[in-house]
Amino acid sequence: MKIAVMGYGTIGSGVVEVIRRNSLKLEKKAGEEIEVKYVLDLRDFPGDPMEECIVHDYKTIVNDDEVKVVVETMGGVEPAYTFVKEMLEAKKHVTTSNKALVAAKGAELLEIAKANNVNFQFEASVGGGIPIIRNINSCLTADILEEITGILNGTTNYMLTKMANEGADFDEVLKDAQEKGYAEKDPTADIEGYDPCRKIAILTSIVSGKTVDFEDIHCEGITGISADDFKYAKKLNRSIKLLASSRQIGSNYVAMVAPYMLDSNHPLYSVNDVFNAVFVRGNVLGDAMFYGSGAGSLPTASAVVADVVEMTKNKDKHLEIEWSGEKLQLLDYKNTESRFFVRTDKSLEDVRKVFGNVEIVDGVIPNEIGFITSHTKESEFEEKAEKLGIINRIRIN
Amino acid sequence: MKIAVMGYGTIGSGVVEVIRRNSLKLEKKAGEEIEVKYVLDLRDFPGDPMEECIVHDYKTIVNDDEVKVVVETMGGVEPAYTFVKEMLEAKKHVTTSNKALVAAKGAELLEIAKANNVNFQFEASVGGGIPIIRNINSCLTADILEEITGILNGTTNYMLTKMANEGADFDEVLKDAQEKGYAEKDPTADIEGYDPCRKIAILTSIVSGKTVDFEDIHCEGITGISADDFKYAKKLNRSIKLLASSRQIGSNYVAMVAPYMLDSNHPLYSVNDVFNAVFVRGNVLGDAMFYGSGAGSLPTASAVVADVVEMTKNKDKHLEIEWSGEKLQLLDYKNTESRFFVRTDKSLEDVRKVFGNVEIVDGVIPNEIGFITSHTKESEFEEKAEKLGIINRIRIN
C-alpha cells in the first residue's frame, strides 16, 4: 500500500515516524506493507530522510493511481477541504487529524467518500491518541449513548492542573504554557473553549447521526477561573475541569463546553496535565471512560495510522459511518438544569432570600461566601444570579 | 438475523434484555433486525417472556440453518466447549463471555471458526463491558503494546476499596462481599487471583499472537493483605490494587497477577469498587486507560451484543484474530525486577545490612518498620527477605 502524507508538521512527521518504526506490526495488521510515497508540503526538507518524497503540488498525488490512502495533517479548513475532496473523488481513502475540517465538512466528505466507494476517517481529530471515534462507531454498538463528556483540550487541562497544584493565577499559568509550547501565541481557541467545542460537535454528530454545528453549542472557556476559585475547589475536595459535554434527553441532544467542579468520585476528576479523557454513559453499559494522550506528535499519529491500517484492510469497501448532512437542532441549554457553585460578597440573608436553602461554603475568602445550588434551570439561575449579584459561578456535577 | 442464546443466567438474560431494549439501534448498526429464536437452558421458565423460545437440546440450534449467530453464556469449559465447537462446525458465528473456555480453548476455537469461514469472538470474557479486546485488535493497531495492566476482577477490587475506606480486615470484607452477592460462597477463584489470571492470559495471547497458558503465570491473590498494610498505604498516599499485568521485554513477555501499591499518579490508582480498568502502554501512543463496569448482567451483555452486531455485519466473512496454538514461553518472573514495600519487625540496622540504603516508612505500626526497596530482581529479593525475616511485602510501582 502506497500512501501520501499532506502536511509535514508535527503530526505529519509523526505519521512518517510511526510507519517507519512499527512497519512489521502494521504489515501484519493491514495485510500488506505500508509505504509513504509522497509527502506534500510547501517547504523543502534538505537532508531529511523523506527529502526525495517531498512534493509541492497536491495534483501529483491526485494523479498517481498507485496511491490509495492519503493522510491529511495540514490543519485548517482550506486548502485541506479542496485537497481532501479531490483525493476522495480520485477514489483514494483519506484520514485526517484536522478537527476544523471535520467539524465544518464531515458529513459532506463522508458522502463523497461513500459515492466513490472509499473511506473518510478522522480518529485523530478528537482526543489525539484516544480511539474514541472507533469506540463509538465500532465498539459500543450495543448501547444508546446517553452522555459523552470529555476533557478534550490538553492545553487548558495543563493550565487548570497547574492552577490547582500551585495556587497560581490564570495569567501566570498561561504564560508558562506558552513558554512550554503547550499554548499558542494566540491562545484564544484553547482558553475560550473553541477547540473542545469543535470536538464535542464531531462526537455528537457521530452519536446522533446528524450534523451538529459547533456554533450552536454554548461555549465557555476558562478565562474566568481564578486562583480563588481553586481555593474553594480544594475545600470542597473537587477539581475544576473544562468539560465538553453532550447529553441525549428523550430524542433530543444538548451540548455545552464549560468549566465544572468535579466530585472526587467522577472518573474525570483525576485526569491531569495534558492528558485527555472521554467519559461515556451507555444505557446498558453504564459508565465507561477512555483516557490517554490528547495531543503530541506520536500519540496523534498513532490514531492516524490506525485509520490507515483499517482503510488498507478495507481498501475495496466503504465502511459506513452514520453522519448525514441533516442539521441536528440542539436543545437550548438555557432550558436544561445544572447545579452551580457560586461566590458572592452579599450577605447570607440575601443569598437565602434569592436562592433558598443552599449549601454554604464559607471561611475560604474574606468578605465573601460560597454556596452550592440545587438543580436549577440555567435561565432561572441567571436571573437569580443577576438579582443577587455574584463574583463567579462554576457548574458542579 | 436469528440468534440463539446458550445459558439463561445472569448474562444470558442480560443479552435478551439488551436486544429487546436497544432493538432499533442494533438494527441500524448491524444492518438487519436481530431476533432471539432460541434460549438453551436446562430449566424451564414458565411465565418468562422467552418461555416459548426455551430449548433443552443444543442440537436443536445446531440443526437450525436459520440461526447464524450463537451466544454462549453458560460458563465453564464443558459442555460449553463441545457446544461451541459444534456451532462453529455448523457454520454459525459464536460469541462467548466465558473466560474459562477462552483461556483453555481460544486458539483452537479460532482455528475452527476460520476453517468454517465464521467468527469466534469473546469481548465479554475480559473486563465485562469494557471493549478491551476490540481496542487491542481493531483500535490500537498502529502500536506495539509494551504493557497491559488491568484491574480485572470486580470482587477483589470491591474488597480492597472497602478495606482502604473503612480500615476493615480481610475476613470482614469477604463476608460483606459474599452477603452482597459480589463474592461466591467459594471465593477462591477471585481472592486467589485465578480469575484475573485467566483474563491476562487471554489478553497476552491476543497481543502476542500465541497461546499463553494461564498456569504459567505467577499468580498471587489478596488473601495476604491486611488492615495493617492499608495503614502503610494511607501513609504513603498509595492504593493497593490487585493487578494482572503483562509486559513485553524485547521479543519476550512476562506476566503476573499480584497486589500492588500504586502511586496516586497511576491511572489505575482511583479505580474503585466493582469497576474494572485496563492500562495500556503503546510504543507510540504512550499511556492509555480504559475504564468501566467489569461485571454485571447488562454491562457484560453490552459487550456480548457488540460482538453479535459485528458478526451480523460480517456474516459472510472471517475477521482475523491473530492467536495461534503455538505456546508462548513466558519469561520467568523471578528474573524480572520489581520494587517492594516491605514490613519487618527486625531492626533498622538489620534492614540496612541486608537491603542497603532503602526508603524507611516508620511510625505506622508499633514494633515494626516499613521500607521500600529499589528495583530488585525477584529472586534476589526473595533471598534477602528470607535472610532478614519479614512480615509482608507488596510490590510497588
Image (cartoon, coloured by chain):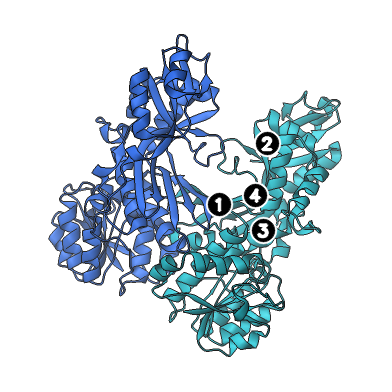
Chain colours: A blue, B cyan
Disc sitting over residue A103 in the figure? none
Coordinates of residue A89 in the picture (x, y in percent): 17, 67
Disc sitting over residue B274 in the figure? 4
Asked whether A177 or B325 is in front, the reply is A177
Tell me if B364 is positioned left or right of B320 in this view: right
The kind of secondary structure element at disc 4 is loop
Report in which chain the residue with disc 3 lies: B
- Residue A66 in sight here: no
Asked whether A150 or B375 is in front, the reply is A150
The kind of secondary structure element at disc 1 is strand
Coordinates of residue A46 in the picture (x, y in percent): 21, 48
The answer to which quarter of the image holds residue B23 is: bottom left
Task: Categorize mark 3 by other alpha carbons within 10 Å: few (<14), some (14-19), many (20+).
Answer: some
Report in which chain the residue with disc 2 lies: B
Asked whether B327 or A291 is in front, the reply is A291
Residue ID at (17%, 47%):
A43
